[in-house]
Image (spheres, rainbow, N blue to C red):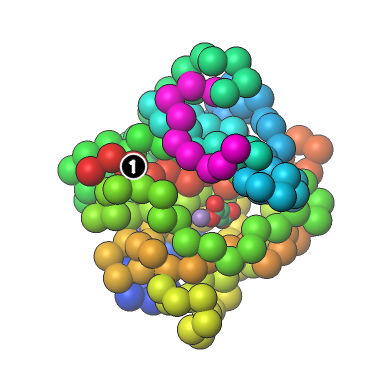
Amino acid sequence: METVLEIAPGVSLWRERLDRAAQRALLGEVLAQAAFYKPVMPGSGKPFSVEEFNFGPLGWYSDKSGYRYTSTDPRTAEAWPPIPPALIDLWKATTNHPAPPECCLVNLYRAGARMGLHQDRDEQAIDAPVLSVSLGDEALFRIGGTTRKGPTRSVKLGSGDVLTFGGPARLAFHGIDRVLSGTSTLVPGGGRINLTLRRVTA
Ligand code: SIN
Ligand code: MN
């Protein structure tokens, strides 16, 4: 029996939705193809503390000229690799959304990396939820409302946990306060990988 926790209206959490074998298989597929890059903030050029890569017809990319969705990796002009089938299945099983995801953003958190509170708002399809899969070290995830100032709550995400936020929470501010280094041995070299799936076009 699998249980889903309603963290807040529109925010659902499945603890260890992926068992260890599924986590290993997915991680293997991701690491075999991912060529991580260090995104920088548009304008300032300040580097993110995470490294990123994308799968899918559209990839979310940030460099000095801005953040945007691209159909190819701007470094190589090659298409991003297809989204791993296990993630498409997971999207179908957890989101109830009729259209497939178009972007799988991969975030790699090595020691000390974090992600400030932000909204995912570069997509037209805000009727589709955001699906997030955690692999490796535990992390403190924070999620609030649709204004930056409102109350937030913090939830620890562990390896294999699957979270969706949609409906009233689709534009919720969220981020990673910190990663608890050394809490998992899954990721070679240590750290955490987050896979975020989104529908982009309406
Ligand atoms: C993100 O919001 O892009 C990443 C969230 C996470 O790492 O869990
Ligand atoms: Mn996000």
Residue lying at 48% horizontally and 46% vertically, measured from the top left: 196
Foreground: 117 or 135? 117
Residue 48: x percent and y percent? 71, 49
Task: Magenta stretch: give its range.
Answer: 65-73
Residue 149 vs 141, above or below: the answer is below
Instruction: Classify residue 186 by image quadrant.
Output: top right
Is residue 29 rendered to the left or right of residue 69?
Answer: right
Foreground: 105 or 157? 105
**Helix, strand or loop for disc 1:** loop
Residue lying at 41% horizontally and 31% vertically, measured from the top left: 58
Residue 67 lies in the magenta stretch: yes
Residue 86 lies in the magenta stretch: no
Residue 124: x percent and y percent? 30, 48
Residue 77: x percent and y percent? 54, 15
Foreground: 157 or 129? 129
Looking at the figure, which quarter contains the C terminus?
top left
Residue 92 vs 13, above or below: the answer is above
Residue lying at 45% horizontally and 76% vertically, measured from the top left: 147
Residue 62: x percent and y percent? 59, 40
Query: Is residue 28 visible to us here?
Result: no
Residue that badge 1 annotates: 200
Foreground: 74 or 14? 74
